Amino acid sequence: MTVDDDLIAKYLSGEATPEEAMALIDWLEVRENKLRFDELEATWNMANPSKQFRSVKKDVAWRKVKPTRSIGFTIGIAASVGLFMVASVWMYISYNQVEIVRLETNDSTSVVKLQDESVVTVNQNTEFEYPVEFTKDTREVRLLGEAFFSIKKDDNKPFIVHAKFSNITVIGTEFNVRCYQQFVEVSVNEGVVLVVTPSDSIFLRKGSSAAFQERERTTPREMDPNTWAYASQKLVFKDTPMADVIEALEKTYSRTISVSNEDIKKCKLRATFDKDSVEKILHLISESLNLKLQQNGEVFILEGDGCP
């Protein structure tokens, strides 16, 4: 039986089968595996301090864990609601005892270095609130919009992003959050992220992404490598339709790109760009697809026959 993060999540939530629990216990005999478990357990405990999970003991595993249906990464609706309520109260206490900085971006991104040396790249049209100093047992911020987080690891002080109806908890990792009125999307570049909503709780691992709605459960999927190109200035296209290429470029560089022929959007591009200007990228695309590039003020126009 394979022991991975989703099985650990089931165990921590009490939803693993006895067979899965015993497999986990055997797996923990390896030191590196125990360190991995301790990291996830710490995240779980800090996100839900009212339900501290006791250490794994082989002689009580069969009694502790009851059989139930497999739900992958999900932790359970009842537990989710409890996690969400506790985190919200924790947020209220924290936010009323420290000085809070409120950042609002308009048509440009902004890079924020937090007191713990974590770095947050805040995208355009975003509201971001953070304390001048992290004085509690958790590091908590609030987001409405989009931001890329590079979090300094601290096993004793988890980092929590409050985004609309969700709470996103990490110890140290890199991830992107898109938070708008109807949904929250989390994409993970490094480490593990715990996302809690009123109806769901999920551990997301490196390379995975998930979109959440307030009253709906979700399933993780493969991450789009260009999600946080606005922060990294790196774009990767693998036989990507030009319609998606244009959308990624417009988001990353805040420029308008149009086509003279809709068939151009059917062409596919395979290329990687790293910290190149949008002008250079469009010139290279034009040459590779036999197109012409025109510019009218702030608008770039791709002209040509396109692809059938």
Image (cartoon, grey):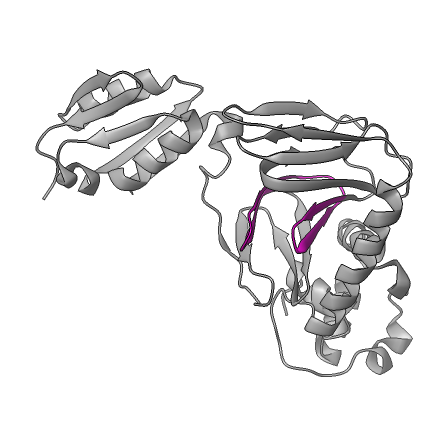
Residue that appears at 91% across and 35% down = 135
| Image coords of residue 278 (percent x, y) | 35, 20
232 on left or right of 289: right
Segment tinted magenta in the rendering: 160-189
Q: Is residue 106 magenta?
A: no
Is residue 30 at all visible to an observer of this figure?
no
Residue that appears at 8% across and 33% down = 305
Residue that appears at 65% across and 65% down = 200
165 on left or right of 250: right
Q: Is residue 304 above or below residue 60?
A: above
Q: Is residue 253 above or below residue 4?
A: above
Q: Is residue 20 above or below residue 99?
A: below
The quadrant in which the C terminus is found is: top left
| Magenta residues, dominant SS class | strand
Residue 216 or 7: which is nearer the viewer?
Answer: 216
| Image coords of residue 40 (percent x, y) | 76, 54
The quadrant in which the N terminus is found is: bottom right
Residue 197 or 107: which is nearer the viewer?
Answer: 107
Using the rendered view, name the quadrant where residue 150 is placed: top right
Residue that appears at 21% across and 39% down = 265
Q: Is residue 178 magenta?
A: yes
